């Protein structure tokens, strides 16, 4: 798998989290928590594009967070 494919997968994961954050049943606290996660993952994605963060580790982390949200 190329780095470009990994970037696309990570972007898709971030978009999935954004979609989940629009769930009307979430509390204000849960929405704030998810908003912070989205911000953090976007920052980490930028760092990964600069080569400061390993894409595999970032993908593993974001996949774990998605599993947590389920």
Image (cartoon, rainbow, N blue to C red):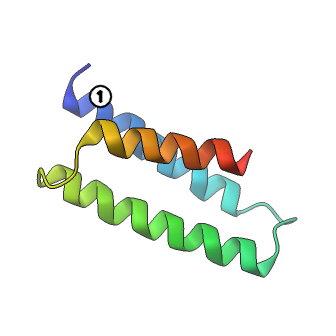
Q: Which residue in the rendered view is the most extreme toward the right?
A: 25
Query: Which residue lies at the image location 32% right of the left edge and 65% below the top edge?
Result: 43
Q: Give the percent coordinates (x, y) of residue 51.
A: 12, 50
Q: Is residue 18 above or below residue 2?
A: below
Depth order, front residue of 47/57? 57
For residue 50, side relative to residue 35 (left or right): left
Q: Is residue 56 above or below residue 17?
A: above
For residue 49, side relative to residue 36 (left or right): left
Q: Give the percent coordinates (x, y) of residue 70.
A: 74, 44
Q: Give the percent coordinates (x, y) of residue 22.
A: 71, 63
| Count of all numbered marks drawn on residues in the image | 1
For residue 11, side relative to residue 18 (left or right): left
Query: Which residue lies at the image location 65% right of the left edge and 41% below the top edge?
Result: 67
Asked if one can make out residue 12 in the rendered structure from this viewpoint, the answer is yes
Q: Can you tell which quarter of the image residue 8 is in?
A: top left
Q: Is residue 49 above or below residue 21?
A: above
Which quadrant, please, contains the N terminus?
top left
Q: Give the percent coordinates (x, y) of residue 49.
A: 17, 51
Q: Which residue is mark 1?
A: 5
Query: Which residue lies at the image location 64% right of the left edge and 78% below the top edge?
Result: 32
Asked if one can make out residue 7 in the rendered structure from this viewpoint, the answer is no
Query: Which residue lies at the image location 61% right of the left edge and 67% below the top edge?
Result: 34
Categorize mark 1 by other alpha carbons within 10 Å: few (<14), some (14-19), many (20+).
Answer: few
Q: Which residue in the rendered view is the most extreme toward the top?
A: 1
Q: Secondary structure at mark 1?
A: helix
């Amino acid at each position: 798998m190329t780095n470009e494919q990994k970037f696309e997968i990570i972007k898709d994961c971030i978009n999935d989290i954004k979609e989940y954050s629009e769930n009307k049943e979430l509390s204000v606290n849960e929405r704030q928590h998810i908003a912070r996660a989205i911000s953090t993952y976007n920052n980490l994605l930028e760092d990964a594009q600069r080569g400061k963060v390993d894409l595999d580790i970032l993908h593993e982390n974001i996949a774990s967070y998605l599993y947590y949200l389920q």
